Amino acid sequence: MAFKTFTSTTLTASEVNDYLMSQAIIRCTSGTRPSSPSEGWHIYETDTRRFLGYRGGQWVPYGRAQELYAFQPDTVNFRIGNDRLISSDLKIEVEAGKKYYFDSHLSMTVSGDTASAWVEIIMVIPSDATGTMFRNSSFDIATGLPTGLHETLSTWEEINFPGTDKRTWSYNVVPLAPDTFIAQRRCGILRTFSQAGTLEVWFKHLTNPDIDTLLMERGSFLRVKEIVEI
Amino acid sequence: MPYKDFGLETLTSSDLNTYAMQQMIIRCTSGTRPSSPTEGWHIYETDTRRLLVYRSGQWVMSVPTDVTAIKNFDESYNNPGVFHNDSELVLPVAGNSTYILTGMIVAQSLSDGFNLRWFFTVPTGTTMRYMTNHPVSDYASGSTVNVRFFNAGDAINMRTQNFSSTGQTAHLHGVVVTGSTPGNVVFRWTNFTAQVTIRGDSFINLRQVS
């Protein structure tokens, strides 16, 4: 690899391989990637239209493709009849065998019986995925007093709910007053193994029937990014 | 330069240099960059994992790139007051560059208290400022709420409570500005009294912005 200023010599096969082929931007498809790449090889996949570099033992897309976003386009009331488990628009596909960093901003308004109206926010991931996240809220779960900016304690949560096809992280919130606005940030690490799937945000209003509305505010978002390790 | 549609002719060394070599993504290290680049050359540094372009007389990032160091396993430590370099939370930085730092430190201890202490070491000439959102021991208004700035080298006491098998997290966010000397940003830590475990999935991330 590296650079060479050629002079009047015979061009050898190894020179073609080392200086040209391994340093060109190879045009291929996602199914015809070079079989034995080394650190720093680059390809453009004509079927996915992605520019990727071989970094840290994996093909990683550059630019926007490396970060994926899902936005809540409109404010939606997730208190629909007696349905208790509701999927939102916040979902992003993740591949098998990857490490991801994810981040989110979840804005909600809950109204109803403030003394006992509980809502559960659930992160759904592939069945054999693991990970760790932390969360900060505009709401103090420890003292029951709004802090305005952040939650008192930043505890970590570890995925430990193996199910038949999904795993979940859950966390309950309780409104302090009618029409309480709650904002929460969740971010952390997601590791996938043999199963591809989606990272999703779901909601569940618990058995309490007194929730009138559970509004997921417009602009809530979920962001996922592949990790490139050094 | 640029593009040439070759016909039936002998491939010359000049052709190779002009149409091929100067238009490759040259794979090198930060110490073996091409010595006489011109505008538009591209390199990929295999040690820093960055794609760079030679623009207006200097190597700059072609596209924003970032690297992450992540702990793949829990690590327990009990040698009070004796700091050690974390073997996994280490990231290289180039000289004369600016990075945005993000990270998550997940810690757990056998008892309540400010049992985790850490700081960062950085290359000579580098400045680093960052904030955390976890409890620290010297916060003026109490020990449970804080948003603080730190400089690299300032030791931090982190509360690592043991709430029903859960520990605590610190979210790190800040900026690293290097001088002319490249090197590593290294997370160094120790325990204060009780044994501390830094959990797998803890990470630091540097996104180069200039």
Image (tube, coloured by chain):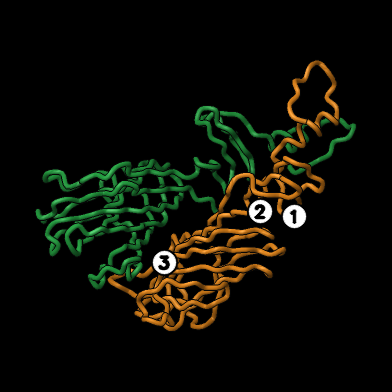
The answer to which of marks 2 and 1 sits earlier in the sequence is 1
Q: Colour of chain A?
A: green
Please report, as a chain letter, where disc 2 is located. B
Are discs 1 and 3 less than 8 Å apart at CB?
no
- Res. B115 image quadrant: bottom left
Given the image, on which type of amino acid does mark 2 rest?
Asp
Q: Position of residue B45 (x, y in %)?
A: 67, 49
Q: Mark 2: which secondary structure?
A: loop
Q: Position of residue A170 (x, y in %)?
A: 26, 56
Residue that sits furthest to the top in the current view: B8
Given the image, on which type of amino acid does mark 1 rest?
Gly
Counting other residues with Cα less than 10 Å from the Cα at mark 3, is it few (<14), some (14-19), or many (20 or more)? many
Above or below, B101 relative to A96:
below
User: Can the viewer see residue B73?
Assistant: yes
The answer to which of marks 1 and 3 sits earlier in the sequence is 1
Please report, as a chain letter, where disc 1 is located. B
Horizontal side, residue A29 vs residue B43: left or right? left
CA separation in Å, label 2 and label 1: 9 Å
Q: Nearer the viewer, residue B194 or A213?
A: A213
Q: Nearer the viewer, residue B87 or A71?
A: A71
Supply the letter of whichever chain is orange: B
Which quadrant does the C terminus of chain A fall into? Answer: bottom right
Residue carrying label 1:
B31
Residue carrying label 2:
B47
Residue carrying label 3:
B106
Q: Mark 1: which secondary structure?
A: loop
CA separation in Å, label 2 and label 3: 28 Å
